[in-house]
Amino acid sequence: MDLHSFIVRAKAATYVGDGKKLLSYRPGSHDLQFHEGAYAYMDSYFGGTDFLGQEVVYHENIPVWVMNYYGYILRPELITPSQAGHVIKVSLSAMYGEGRFLGGFEHRVDDFIYTDTSEGTHEHFTGKEWITYEGTRCYELVYHGGLVKP
């Protein structure tokens, strides 16, 4: 099994797939996990409307890949946190259905347009996702990550 494919499956099964939440590792955190063979994926984030988190993939209990992210509502009068979550889940589910998790993706959900753009590959990347409503950006998230080596 290759790392990129595992990451896509793990992301699809956890936040986007409404995966089972675990007991918090740290006070106030939201924690999700996915295991397959020798790989384990862990996503831990803080907050709700504005949030910060980290995803880590382990291979045989050794961290091999990490992504950090920070998302926030820019215009609360245009989008609620639940609307943003819905748009993100539907859009990312469509992207993961294409077998990928990095940018160059746009998806319409109701009156919102989700856009994701990034540079690099799963080995080293930076990116941004955002949601617009009637041409106005109302939510965005920045992310970066890649392989980690001892």
Image (spheres, rainbow, N blue to C red):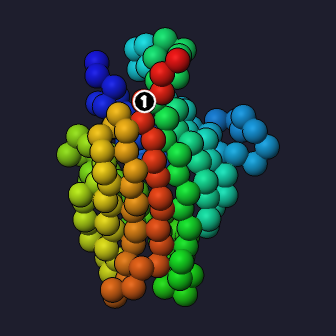
* Residue 64: x %, y % from top left: 46, 23
Circle count: 1
Secondary-structure class at tag 1: strand
For residue 56, say whether it is visible.
Answer: yes
Vertical placement of 34 versus 132: above or below? above
Q: Quadrant of the N terminus?
A: top left
Residue 21 visible (yes or no): no
| Residue at the left extreme of this rendering | 98
Residue 138 spot, x, y in % from top left = 46, 78
Residue at (55%, 87%) from the top-left corner? 77
User: Circle 1 sits on which residue?
Assistant: 147
Instruction: Tell which of 9 and 57 is nearer to you.
Output: 57
Residue 47 placement (x, y as % from top left):
67, 58
Residue at 52% x, 17% y: name it.
150
User: In this rendering, would 89 be left or right of 79?
Assistant: left
Q: Amino acid at mark 1?
A: Leu
Q: Residues within 10 Å of mark 1 (few under 14, many from 20)?
A: some
Judged left or right of residue 68, residue 38 is left
- Seen at 30% across and 45% down, the residue is 120
Please tell me which residue is depicted at 37% across the width and 39% down the height of the picture.
124
